[in-house]
Image (cartoon, rainbow, N blue to C red):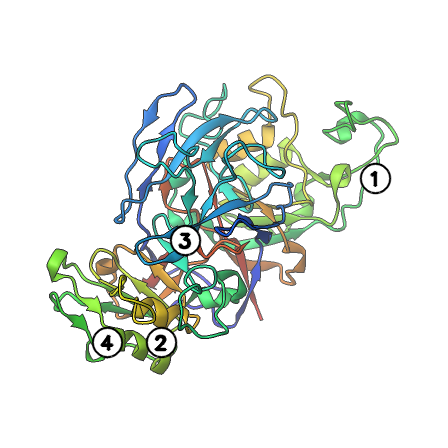
Amino acid sequence: MISLKGHKVVDLTWELVSRVTRMDQTIEEGVRDVYNMPWIVEESYNEKDGTIEQLVACNEGTFAGWQVGGVSGHMGSHIQLGVRHNDNWSGLPDGMKGLWEMPIDAYYGEACVCQLDHLKGEPILKEHLSNVKEGDIVIMGSTNRGKDVPWIDGDTAYWLAEEMKIKMLCPGVPGIGWETKAKEPEPENCPTHRAMTGNNIPITYPLVNIEKLTKDRCFFMSLPLNVGRMEGTWVRAIAIEEE
Amino acid sequence: MFSFDGYKPVDLSPHVEARIYRVDGSVEEGTNDPYGKPWVMKEGRFVGDNSLYTLYAAPPGGDEVWHQERMTSHHGCHVQGGKGHISHWAGVSEDMKGLWEFPLETFMGEAAVCNLKDLAPQAIKNPSEYPLGEGVSLLSKEGDVRGQEIKPEHLGNIQEGDIVLMTSPYTGLEQPWLSKSTCEWLINDRKIKMIGFGVPGIEWQYDLKLAAPDNSPIRRMLLGANIPVAHPLVNIETLTKDRVFYVGTPLNFVKSEASFIRAIALQEE
């Protein structure tokens, strides 16, 4: 039987503190993720059993800090694939899948840990990723910030996707610039996004605590919700490594 | 290296198809969870990179499948803890935890599979044999065919500290039901870590309208003992092994009384 004995679980998930509107209408402010994305809830009374169930998000136009109302699947650490997300971009291949179309085992497995503190404000090249094995989940992080953050070069992204055939890309943010050229005209835009989703390689981000991993390799898991047509879903991303 | 090699994943989360309002004005119909709750979303376009996203929300005022704009964290497969959920009830334990306060290992580990298919419904002899009635009746009456009480002798495969996955093929008032005494045994004798209920399959939500502290005894006992509850689960009956490895970790949202989960079992091949 699988056992956690002799292993430790490392939480790689951004912690969001919910902005809660309580039953008495007091409001407890929350803490957002690195992209300034919030998690917003409001207590409501379930008349059927007297429990409190939190309504998720806020009604459109009722909170100046989140005018759109609903929350997307991209709040905090999340996972995404191409269908219904970037399959509207020109130049992507046929055969892209949605998160809900992949087998469950696409979302866990052996991972290599690429801690890239030594790269300061420079592109991440394949020679920096010598511990990546074919078929790996790739966890990438650095403790650098601002202009010192290394970024995934487009050629590196395609090397990971098409030569190393990685199973998942999992960048820490801040620490890794994983997307570039967001405003370039298609099909030159967003090479990492294209390389991954175009090859049905899920991207899980933003992750934290990668620097706390002490081994070169670990087990990684980030399971999407079982909701069809969600192009991205919140996840609890964890690593399990030997103690 | 920790690994799931040699184990087959079995999805215990009911699949829900989102009902989506697309940016082009079309609507794609969705499906409901086992409790009949939908999952409604609105598509948008992110100007930063022209990608698409969906918001977990119905149109303002609701629509024909959901009566209001917002849904809860109890739609689809979810896990719940006590703090923030029942901590306003009179008589609950003061040290009840919120989901965010449990170690992650609470939500993963070795699990006992309890498929109570042998507990076929029976005609009852007195109302105390089943905690619910039909229609407006609060209790059942002699001769009604009702689910059986789940007793410790039906749960012989549960080991101390286990996660428990429980189901049966029965529905409605024919579902076997978890009694207070058996729940106490699970908590104090078996010291279970977490429990997941198949829906339909197990009746555990009853006496909902009794005055506190007698209301919702099973929810009160489990959450009061800091045993999170995952539900609605499916496919427990497809597990062929007595014991599996379970994973159903909550999202990392502090102060959320419940959380959407992807619940899976890993079964030896």
Q: Earlier in the sequence, mark 3 or mark 4?
A: 4
Which disc, if any, is residue B252? Answer: none
When the figure is inspected, residue B214 is found, relative to residue A96, above or below; the finding is above
Q: Which residue is mark 1?
A: B122
- Going 84% across and 26% down the picture, which residue do you hit? B141
Q: Earlier in the sequence, mark 2 or mark 4?
A: 4
**Marks 3 and 4, Cα distance to the nearest angstrom?**
25 Å
Same-chain check, marks 2 and 3: yes
Q: Earlier in the sequence, mark 2 or mark 3?
A: 2
Task: Say which amino acid is labelled 4.
Answer: Leu
Task: Say which amino acid is labelled 3.
Answer: Val
Q: Secondary structure at mark 1?
A: strand
Task: Say which amino acid is labelled 1.
Answer: Gln
Q: Which residue is mark 3?
A: A235
Are the residues at dot 2 and dot 4 in contact (C-beta closer than 8 Å)?
no
Q: Nearer the viewer, mark 1 or mark 2?
A: 2
Q: Which residue is mark 4?
A: A129
Q: Secondary structure at mark 2?
A: helix
Q: Chain of mark 1?
A: B
Residue nearer the viewer, A152 or B124: A152
Q: Nearer the viewer, mark 1 or mark 4?
A: 4
Q: Which residue is mark 2?
A: A161
